[in-house]
Structure formats: structure tokens, C-alpha cells
Amino acid sequence: MLRLFHKVLEKPLYFNTITRVFAIGGREKRINESVSGLFNKECMGEVLEIGSGTGQFSYYYLKHLGTYTATDINLDYLRYSKKKVGTIKYVTCDSSMLPFSSQSFDRVFALFMFHHLSGKMSLSSLREMKRCLKKHGKIVIIDPFVPENRMDFVGRLLAKMDRGRWIRKRGDFCRLLKHAGLRIDAEMKMNGSWPYNMWTYILSWA
């Protein structure tokens, strides 16, 4: 049953519907405020988004940029996004094999993507993101992690049920960042993210 539910979420319309359900109770507003503050500081220059999905964050990018490059492995997601916004450069590709020149972007964003990737895929994707990043650029990642509080039963249950099969502990993710040759410049817990345990990472070349 859970696999069927995850399969349904691969369709853009159903995915967006579930996203709106999780926004009930002002949660979306609090998360959007955190995302907006992050973009105000970090969205600049030539920007690449990895795992852009249905383009749910396109507003924040275009608030600061004339255009940017959005990628996803799901062609249906990109087609859905393009119906909403046509000024974005869309590229269908695997995050572990990015079809871009080395050191060609000032910022590389990956929002809520890594919990969908195995450890091996995550490491390959991080190395590709670093390759595409200019020497003095930044990588911006937001992702959910397993709650550190063992008594947070709701959060831990959601982590098991989430469509992302690889929600990991933050310590494990930090080890992947180190293996990819990335330095953590900042890490911040996202306000209002409960029952998920969402964190933001700002990274650069180590």
C-alpha cells in the first residue's frame, strides 16, 4: 500500500495536493518565511537547482533572478513546472551526472532532494554539484533528517513513511559532505518544520 502511495506521488498533481495538505495550520507560512530569508542572502549570480520537482520554489528564485537552470530526473515534473513558468531553463538529468561545464555556477541549490538518494547516489551528486560550482560559490541544501530526540515518535514515524527512502541522521549526512570535499559554512534548523526535522546547509569548497 505504501509503495502504491509513493507511486501516485510521482504524478505532479497528486504531489502538489499532498504538499498543500502538509501546509495546514500555518506550517507552510513558517517554512516559506525561512526559505525566503535564505534566498534573500544566497540567491545570486548563475544559479542551478538540482531536483527541482514541480517548481514549487520557482517564485523565490525569480524574485532575485531573471532566469536560472532547473533540473530533475522526472520529465513529468519539469513539464508541469514549465506550464507555470516558461522563463526557466529546464534540463532533464540525473543529479549524479550533470551535463554542465565545471565551475559554471555561483550557487547550486538542492531543496528536499537528498532523502530520495542512497548514500552512493548522494555522494556522487554532491561531487557533481561541487564540480559545477565556481571556486568561491556556495551550495545550498535543505533536507529532512531523522529526529535526534528519541521521544519524538511522530517525527520518527513520518521519517519511515516518507517517500524518500533514505532519510538519514545528520551526522551521516555530514560525513558524506566531508567525503565529497565540501566545507560546512553554516547549518541551521528550519523554524516550523515539525513534525519533520529540516535543516539548511550552506557549503563551499573545502
Image: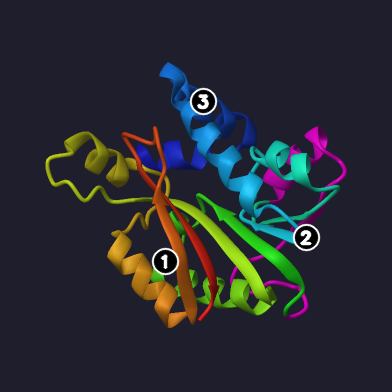
Q: Residue at x 83, y 50 (%)?
A: 67
* 15 relative to 171 in the view: left or right: right
At label 2, which amino acid type do we have?
A: Gly
Q: Nearer the viewer, mark 3 or mark 2?
A: 2
For marks 3 and 1, the one nearer the N-term is: 3
- The answer to whether residue 18 shows anywhere in this view is no
Image coordinates for residue 135, horizontal then vertical, percent: 67, 79
Q: Residue furthest top?
A: 25
> Which residue is identified by label 3?
29
Which quarter of the figure is the N terminus placed in? top left
Element under label 1?
loop
Q: Which mark is residue 118?
A: 1
Say few, some or many: other residues with alpha carbon within 10 Å of mark 1 (under 14 / 14 to 19 / 20 or more): some
Q: Residue at x 65, y 62 (%)?
A: 108
For marks 1 and 2, the one nearer the N-term is: 2
- The answer to whether residue 1 shows anywhere in this view is yes
At label 1, which amino acid type do we have?
A: Ser
The residues bearing labels 3 and 1 have C-alpha atoms spaced at a distance of: 30 Å
Say few, some or many: other residues with alpha carbon within 10 Å of mark 3 (under 14 / 14 to 19 / 20 or more): few
Way the structure is coloured: rainbow
* 118 relative to 152 in the view: left or right: right
Q: Residue furthest left?
A: 151
At label 3, which amino acid type do we have?
A: Lys
In the depicted view, which residue is nearer to us: 206 or 116? 206
For marks 3 and 2, the one nearer the N-term is: 3
Image coordinates for residue 188, horizontal then vertical, percent: 41, 51
Q: Residue at x 47, y 75 (%)?
A: 183
> Which residue is identified by label 2?
45
Instruction: State the extent of the magenta-drawn residues as a range.
Output: 75-102
Q: Residue at x 65, y 52 (%)?
A: 74
